[in-house]
Image (cartoon, rainbow, N blue to C red):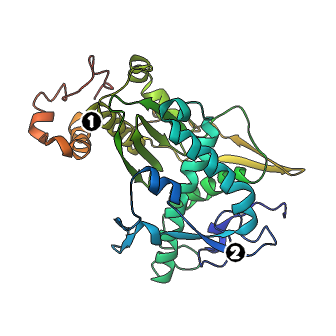
Amino acid sequence: MKSTIYQPFKNFDFKFKNCFLSGDNFDAPVEEINILPDWLLKAGNLTGEEQIKLLDESIRAYNTLKVPCSTEVNTQFIQPLEDKIAAAFAEGYAGVSALSEEELFQWIGKFMYGFIYIEMNAAVGLQQISADGINMSQGLMHKFGNLNTMLQSIYRPMVYENFTPWSIVVVPLEDKETNFSFRDEINTLTFSLKLKDFGIIACLQDNGTNKMYHEEILTQIGTKPLSAEQFEELSARFYYSAYLFNRLPEYTIMPVEGTVYIDAMPLRGTINKALFDHWQHKTYAQVLQEFWKPWGHTLFEIIKDPTKPMSYFEPACLPVTQ
């Protein structure tokens, strides 16, 4: 393996020629692997024919969502990670909650970055993005590039210097037979998944701030199993706060003798304002309505009291609005 850090956003390397995680850092053939692995489809009782709409409005079946991967990276690093995550998922909450946050970050990050790679490939193919990336937000490229760098921890030693790049929450669910579903928001790198008796919520590039932001409700929940409505409400809070998070994390990245050391720059920097924009109950209620669609709650019902949106938690522990 070469010692260089792969940086695909420098030359928009999304042409299915090099490994999506390591570029050409390995002298091994490239194969295509599924974003949704077979074990996950099986665990979720899915056939693979289920469809998803991508950002370019194309409709793709799950089993057609593939990315190029070095056979060495896949065999020696990705497959062992998949096997460990699959075994944990099979055990349910007990198994998943025993995983390290870094293992969850690597698996969720690889999952999300696979979608980003496919979206980038489509955008480059449609010439929506030129070779210098001029038609894409510099902030997004920066975030996606940092995510790719951190995902290289799957196959090379990486040390985070006194910080955690992510917020990850694993909670038990009341319904022990919850159907598999996942949701993601690429712009904020926010992800959620539920299956069997557990749910996962993750913000992948926030240096742990969203978890701190919701510390009160998370402390109240503890390890108490959540109803389906409560899990979706908690997810909605994280997705909305990730949208309100107004910093672009910066890192110092230093490879030293085969190990990559990453140090986080202070989030406050020189900006003289809070890390999150003001929480607005009305906007949050609109997010919540989308997450509560299966229960048919109307926006009027959710925000009937503008100072106290509907909640399945008691107390609601909502952030203070301004």
Instruction: Please identify the quarter of the rendering in which residue 105 is found.
Output: top right
Residue 160: x and y in percent read 71, 39
In the image shown, does 1 or 260 lie closer to the viewer?
1
| Vertical comparison of 59 with 97: above or below | below
Residue 319: x and y in percent read 33, 26
* Residue type at the position of mark 2: Val
**Residue ID for mark 2:** 30
Left or right for 193, reference 100 = left
Residue 278 in view (yes/no): no
Residue 300 in view (yes/no): yes
In the image shown, does 314 or 270 lie closer to the viewer?
314
Residue at 40%, 34% (x, y): give it.
197
| Vertical comparison of 166 with 141: above or below | above
Q: How many labels does the image show?
A: 2
- Locate the N terminus and report the quarter of the image it occupies: bottom right
Left or right for 129, reference 153 = left
In the image shown, does 113 or 216 lie closer to the viewer?
113
* Residue type at the position of mark 1: Gln
Residue at 38%, 22% (x, y): give it.
217
In the image shown, does 314 or 34 lie closer to the viewer?
34
Left or right for 155, reference 193 = right
**Residue ID for mark 1:** 280
Residue at 49%, 60% (x, y): give it.
36
Sooner in the amino-acid sequence: mark 2 or mark 1? 2
Residue at 39%, 58% (x, y): give it.
46
- Locate the C terminus and report the quarter of the image it occupies: top left
Characterize the local packing of mark 2: few (<14), some (14-19) or many (20 or more) Cα atoms within 10 angstroms: many
- Tell me the mark number nearer the camera, choosing from 2 and 1: 2
| Vertical comparison of 248 with 312: above or below | below
